[in-house]
Amino acid sequence: MFVSVTTDQRSRINSLSEFGISSGSNPIVSLSEFTYKKGKIIYIESDPAEYVYQVRKGAVRTCKLLPDGWRQIGAFHLPGDIFENGGAHRFTAEAITHTTVRLIRRLHLETVAETDAVVWRTLLSLTTNNLQHAENHMLLLGRKTALQRVAAFLHEMNERLTAADVISLPMSRRDIADYLGLTIETVSRAVSQLHSDGILDFIGNTQREIMIRDRQRLASLDMQS
Amino acid sequence: MFVSVTTDQRSRINSLSEFGISSGSNPIVSLSEFTYKKGKIIYIESDPAEYVYQVRKGAVRTCKLLPDGWRQIGAFHLPGDIFENGGAHRFTAEAITHTTVRLIRRLHLETVAETDAVVWRTLLSLTTNNLQHAENHMLLLGRKTALQRVAAFLHEMNERLTAADVISLPMSRRDIADYLGLTIETVSRAVSQLHSDGILDFIGNTQREIMIRDRQRLASLDMQS
DNA sequence: CGGGGGCTTGAGGCCACTCAACGATAGTGG
DNA sequence: CCACTATCGTTGAGTGGCCTCAAGCCCCCG
């Protein structure tokens, strides 16, 4: 599959712990780095290959497609995040911006793990974290209003990709809409409302730079009202 | 936590493989059986205890609650199903009907696993399966219509708890609604429509016994139209 | 028999979607 | 430098699907 993908850079690193997975005994695992241009596919749903990925730079979306054109984004992966595909791929992963990922073969990992429970534990907690995120997202998709969803999204992003209360969103309104189970118009309207309510401001002339003015009220919308 | 719960029966079995988790070397793990009356709580969200459960008889729902009273059911667990709660409980688990579960301490399991990668692999694939289910459910909650959701639900149940095309649902319309992110009225209307469209029939005088007349059309609704 | 819970059905309202127009921005080629 | 175009985002008007509220039926169980 990788032959069909833009590979600008490639390097090898001999460390498992650099990947964020600490191994007690076996530090020698091959690690590769790939770079994908904006919009390029990292892997497709039902792709047989098995890797574990870590975002180095950029952002990745994992999504499912419906026959009628609808798309559901399951998660956004930002620098530092590890995402994987146990068994067969259940999602399609795409680069949102110019993105660099590290990757490691699952098989190699499990070979190491054979003699090292720490790796297993890490792999499991990785999957559990993804599961937890999915469970919270089910609640959002099933039971929250448009405004609550957008507030929850901004709240999540504010915690994940910023130190101060200034967010620089890598993804488009379409991505956000497909993540929140809404349309782009509804997302836009909700953001506008949060702006006119004094909860956030726009920075610069692009709409992807957002400053949170009232984190408290944003959080309270997220937590429910 | 268990002191506050109805415990009608209790037994001990010394086998891990009976639980559905095959261990190559260490078959001696304590296994308990508990019975819960209809509606009783098995564990509560944020409960610290760590167990892995297997449904023996009955049915279990795992759900999250919102401050404003909304409920989202993440999954139904039927006889044979294994469900767990890595780390802290992320859900509340309740018995839908009179239910018997086997349970095993996660800690015990991981102690065994220390020397047995098969257990780790099983535990991981268990979590991965749950994750896959959650991912599919996100698609349902985010991008499907009421009719498609109900069709998908019946399709799922038809595959999980019946041999012929006769389903005996253990859960109420409220449970179904909270699973599908709908109201009971909408669920009821959708089922009625499927009935009047000749896709399903009711059996007996209760509305929980359903016979699928046209599995093909049910599946095509599920798969999207 | 009366009461209550579960389920259905109807009437009306609201929130999010649809369709459409428009402005802003970035990239392209002259 | 300026059209020209495509993409992205916002905003408005109108529709529709699901929710809300309400009534009524059926069954179970006292």
Image: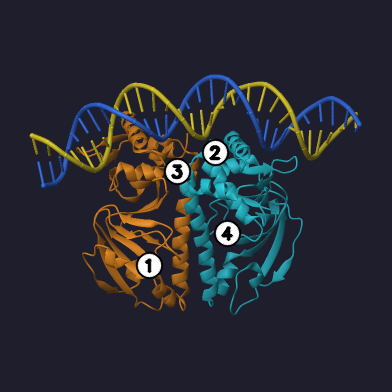
Chain colours: A cyan, B orange, C yellow, D blue
Q: Residue at x 61, y 51 (%)?
A: A157
Q: Position of residue A105 (x, y in %)?
A: 61, 65
Q: What element does badge 4 sit on?
A: strand
In the visual, does B43 lie left or right of A141? left
- The residue beneath circle 2 is A182
Q: Which residue is mark 1?
A: B51
Dots 4 and 3 on the same chain: yes
Q: Earlier in the sequence, mark 4 or mark 2?
A: 4
Mark 1 and mark 4 in contact (Cβ < 8 Å)?
Answer: no
Name the side, left or right, on which B90 lies relative to A153: left
**Residue A94 location in percent, x, y?**
64, 49
Using the numbered discs, state the Cα–Cα distance from disc 4 to disc 1 in whole angstroms.
25 Å
* Disc 1, SS: strand
Residue highlighted by disc 4: A84
Question: What amino acid is labelled 1 in the image?
Answer: Tyr
Label number found at residue A143: 3
- Amino acid type, callout 2: Leu
> Is residue A85 or residue A100 the one in the foreground?
A100
Q: Quadrant of the N terminus of chain A?
A: bottom right
Is disc 2 on the same chain as disc 4?
yes
Chain letter of the residue beneath label 4 in the structure image: A
Label 4 – label 3 distance at C-alpha: 28 Å
Q: Secondary structure at mark 2?
A: loop
